[in-house]
Image (cartoon, rainbow, N blue to C red):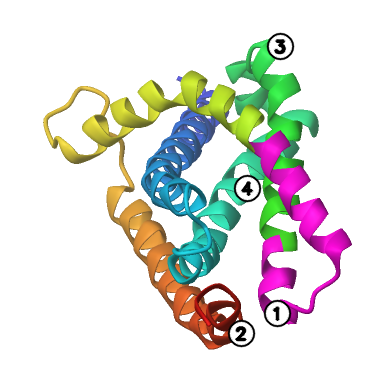
Amino acid sequence: MDDSYSTDAVDAGRAELGVRQNARLTSLTGFVLLGALFAEGITVLSVGSLIVPHMVIGALLLAPVALKLSTTGYKIVRYYTGAPAYVAAGPPPIARRLLAPLVMVATVGLLGTGVLLMIEGPQATGRMSFLHKGFFVVWFVAMTMHVLIHALGSVRAVVAEYLARHPDALPGRGARALSLAGCLVAGAGLAMWATGFTAPWTAIFHG
């Protein structure tokens, strides 16, 4: 067998594995986000009385959102720069391609305005509050569609990841677990940081 052919085949196999590993980490991060977003959604139902958990969970969300945007962005960049393994995997369906940018922009806008409101306190401008609410409406619609499309895939990824004998088990589980653990630790740190900004808001709603 030609050594160059053998080397190319090995490289192609590694690249294809990298595509699957990136997709798996994306799905696992999405599963983590589902739980955190559900908790945050509960606080929205009564944001006045639940302002502290609303701010704390919102800050915690920054870390898993950043990880998911990173893995998704990496896939997009690799595909559009012509990486053979990502090109071979093909683009997602057109509906998902159209929805993804809206989800990304709305998520960044929602969390960004939320952080600014948290830091500036109740004296923040009405425009910032309006933007936060506006981003929430867009985000809620887009994210609902996103969850309906991806929720089952995230659950399947968790099953495949943590059942050792599952036929879709992938190498690199330890690295993915470390990435998720680091993400959660960072999120916990951000949540603790957010507690330093809760007092003025608590005074407004409970004073």
Report the front residue among 106 and 6: 106
- How far is mark 1 from mark 4, CA to CA? 27 Å
- How far is mark 3 from mark 2, CA to CA? 45 Å
In the image, which disc is placed on residue 200?
A: 2
Q: Name the residue under label 1.
A: 121
Horizontal and vertical percent position of residue 62: 57, 61
Q: Mark 3 points at which residue?
A: 94
In the image, which disc is placed on residue 69?
A: 4
Q: Nearer the N terminus, badge 3 or badge 4?
A: 4
Mark 1 or 4, which is nearer the eye? Answer: 1
- How far is mark 3 from mark 4, CA to CA? 19 Å
- How far is mark 2 from mark 1, CA to CA? 6 Å
Quadrant placement of the N terminus: top left
Report the front residue among 150 and 67: 150
Q: How crowded is mark 1: few (under 14 residues within 10 Å), some or many (20 or more)?
A: some
The kind of residue on which mark 1 rests is: Gly
**Label 2 with label 1: CB-CB less than 8 Å:** yes
Image position of 100 (left or right of 6): right
Q: Is residue 185 above or below residue 11?
A: below
The kind of residue on which mark 2 rests is: Pro
Q: Quadrant of residue 111?
A: bottom right
Horizontal and vertical percent position of residue 32: 38, 47
Q: Residues within 10 Å of mark 2 (few under 14, many from 20)?
A: some
- How far is mark 2 from mark 4, CA to CA? 31 Å
Q: Nearer the N terminus, badge 3 or badge 1?
A: 3
Q: In this view, does 205 lie above or below 99?
A: below
Mark 3 or 2, which is nearer the eye? Answer: 2
Q: What element carries label 1?
A: loop
- The magenta stretch spans residue 90: no
